[in-house]
Image: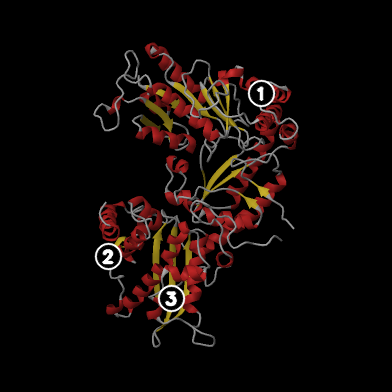
Amino acid sequence: MSKKQYYFDYAATTPLDPKVFSAMLPYFKEEFGNPSNLYGLGRNAGRAIEGATKTITEILGCRLDEFIYTGSATEADNLAILGVARSQRASFGTQGSPLKNFAPKGDPLRPLAPRIIMSQIEHKGILAVCDVLEKEGFGIVRLPVLKNGLVDLNELKKELNDRTILVSITMADSETGTIQPIFEIAKIIKEFCRENAHLGKFPVFHTDASQSAGYLDINVDKLGVDMMTISAHKIYGPKGIGGLYVRKGTKINPIIYGGGQQGRLRSGTENTPGIVGFAKSLELNSKNKKSEIVRIKKMRDALEKGIFKSIPKVVLNGHPTNRLPNFLNISILDVEGEAMLLYLDELGIMVSTGSACNSQNLEPSYILAALGNSYEHIHGSLRFTLGKKNTMQDIKYVLKHLSNVVKKLRSISSLDLSLNQKKWQNKIKKM
Amino acid sequence: MAKQNKKDVVNKYTGDSWAYTKEVKEHFFKPKNLLLEDPKKAKYDAEGIVGSPACGDVMRVWLKIDKKNDRIKQFKWRTFGCASAIASTSMLSVMVTEPARRGGEKGMKIDKALKIKPQDIMKRLGGLPDRKIHCSVLGDKALRAALNDWFKKTKQFSRIVVDGKQILDPNTKTTEADIEEAVLEGATTLLAVQKRTKVGIGYPQCLPKVEELIRFYREKYFGKE
């Protein structure tokens, strides 16, 4: 006996589309060949990958050799950041390199280290790699975001300098789905490159489009990006396959070494079924994109409106309009996210929260924190992300139950955040 | 329905489990001894509060006390926090008010209640995920805060428990003893201690002192580096 599931966590992952599964199936079974091999089975696998790459690169509007398959979006992010950083390390200190004044950590010349600019709301696959590079001596700039979730472009302009090798800004973050003005950012960077022609092709501009690929235009020339991460399992494709678009001529080193597959940029036998599934999911997505966006946005807006109408003391997180159509992130004051999540789970409703209590390291969501929210605000955050299987019926079900859950947990709660902060501090002091 | 395992998802690197026990769920979904509305003044004999909204856990406790027998007759509460915070306060309220044995007198002796440790609450809950232990740490502190309130009101000043130690962070009511315990359990850096106790997150003024204590206990128990 299984109860009906109300899945609202499509930003975490999506179910595999049956059509994608059918497309993949032969490459698990009879067409199991290694694409590096010359005999028939190998050639079949090779042809399948070629076809898949053609489909994907047509959608991205790029050349066949500009797309690298990886094991995940995280790996693609790592390849983008580490790959470009390492390609530059070799030229540190050499004459004529813009980076010749590179200095190791602790050196008074450190401000001259090569610089990577990213935002504070990047995916962990970028944040963590940049932390490592910082220890290795790179200068890392973490751009602040405005209260509405948009990256501060004035700050970006200020931070660009002749040591900047890379800029990485997410297309839409994974908590609020706020859409960044990628085209504008690309323009700022291109302008900078024009004025500093002696730097060659630096800085390189990377964007992580894993959350947004299903809903936004991902034509790389229209966007003006040099590198772009996408992922299959966010668009009804299989897990374990992601990819990185790398513009021809970008200086980048591999991070995985071996047999030299994929133009030496990513060694390892290609994941044929994964690649075929990736292409199929992207193809299906681009076919149905327009109508699906309209359908999902209508449901999301109904959910949003309904919640604000039925529950007092709710705050919207992220940009009110400039947001992926399937994202709704709210903070419900005086209740804690994990507690809500578990009560909703009992009702078959699956959502996520940025509350510290729900994370492995007890840290509240760094993305919601970067938006300038207080911790007590973040602890009460809930993220609904909609997708293919949701219906208006589901929205009605959530609206019917959420206000009761909140009512119940508020009755348990010892908090009333309309209390002003001072009053609260005094209360604590008195005890 | 599928059989429910006691621990259904275990992290193979940390041995930590995501899932809550049946007891935790019972107290989380059906909390006992809740006080749904702020009481009128003097309806209860004592009140205690601990935690901070920024940390994600705030517990308020109200007690009714049988002065003659020195017993806690009622333990009412409200908690802002996650499942384990709610369940552990609920469990504590049961532990403090139930009879010690079958047919015995209801309500725990104050002296016994003062000795309740977080570990005692966790045991009754059938355990908590490691990262969640700090939540129940707060339950016993809220109880002690309320009992101190009672001692003040009844002028039993000698009974006021300062835990023998100084409170470092008034928000989380973290004491020197908590720091010592955290270090003993292997949290030897400020970050690790904060993950356990949340000390100083809402009250950074105390951090220099906390760091000094961590150094002191680290050297005491693990020797100099």
Q: Which mark is residue A29?
A: none
Q: Which residue is mark 1?
A: A37
Q: Amino acid at mark 2?
A: Gln
In the image, residue A348 above or below residue A24: below
Camera-nearest residue between B15 and B83: B15
* Residue B156 as seen in the image, left or right of residue A6: left
Determine crowd level at label 1: few under 14, some 14-19, many 20+ residues with C-alpha closer than 10 A: few
Q: Where, quadrant-wise, is the C terminus of chain A in this rendering?
A: bottom left
Q: How many marks?
A: 3
Residue at image point 27% right, 79% down: B158
Q: Amino acid at mark 3?
A: Leu
Residue at image point 61% right, 18% down: A64
Structural distance between the alpha carbons of marks 2 and 3: 24 Å
In the image, residue A386 above or below residue A210: below
Q: Secondary structure at mark 2?
A: loop
Q: Amino acid at mark 1?
A: Asn
Chain letter behind tag 3? B
Determine crowd level at label 2: few under 14, some 14-19, many 20+ residues with C-alpha closer than 10 A: few
Q: Is residue A179 visible?
A: no
Q: Are marks 1 and 3 on the same chain?
A: no
Tell me which corner region of the image, top left, top right, bottom left or bottom right, holds residue B20.
bottom right
Q: Which residue is mark 2?
A: B166
Camera-nearest residue between B152 and A43: A43
Q: Are marks 2 and 1 on the same chain?
A: no
Residue A130 at x, y = what percent?
41, 33
